[in-house]
Image (cartoon, grey):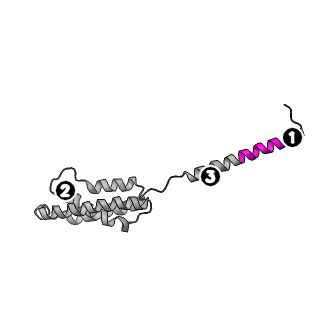
Amino acid sequence: MLLTGDRRIEQEMSLVACKSCAFVLSIGTLAGCSPAPAPAAHLTMADIQPIVTPLTYRELLGAKCGEPNIAVKTAFLADLKAAGASAGLMSEAEAEAATIEAAERDTPNEYVCTVELFDSTEKNAAAAQKAWADLKSRKS
């Protein structure tokens, strides 16, 4: 079918309009499907301080007292990074843990490896892990 002047121009303009609409719809769809921010993307040290400290003490007690597989602070930091924490926040968290570890390095094991301290750090670490789970679900 041959189209003459005005009819051909009208059909080409219609085709251009359809392509424009399709492009706008594609962009709108992409914008609507953009991923949500990571759970830890907007956290601050104030948010995670109550988590880092007890987990660091629990892991430190485990290391000093010969408990295998008690890397709760290490696991938390890995999870924090995987949840989208900024490099700055990761540095702050690691520095806080290192400060605690340095302060406790010379404490004799007989003062650390007690039932009371074990129970206390275990309870505090459990509360910190619950706080982390709550924080992740609130921020996401």
Q: Mark 3 points at which residue?
A: 28
Relative to residue 127, is residue 1 drawn left or right? right
Relative to residue 120, is residue 77 drawn left or right? right
Q: In which quarter of the image is residue 131?
A: bottom left
* Disc 1 secondary structure class: helix
Relative to residue 31, is residue 17 drawn left or right? right
Q: Mark 2 points at which residue?
A: 62
* Quarter of the image where the N terminus is located: top right
Relative to residue 30, is residue 59 drawn left or right? left
Label 3 or label 1, whichever comes before in sequence order:
1
Q: For the residue carrying disc 2, how many other residues have a C-alpha within 10 Å: few (<14), some (14-19), or many (20+)? A: many
- Which region of the structure is painted magenta? 8-20
* Disc 2 secondary structure class: helix
Q: Mark 1 points at which residue?
A: 7
At label 1, which amino acid type do we have? Arg
Specify the label residue 45 is tagged with. none
Q: Does residue 101 show up?
A: no
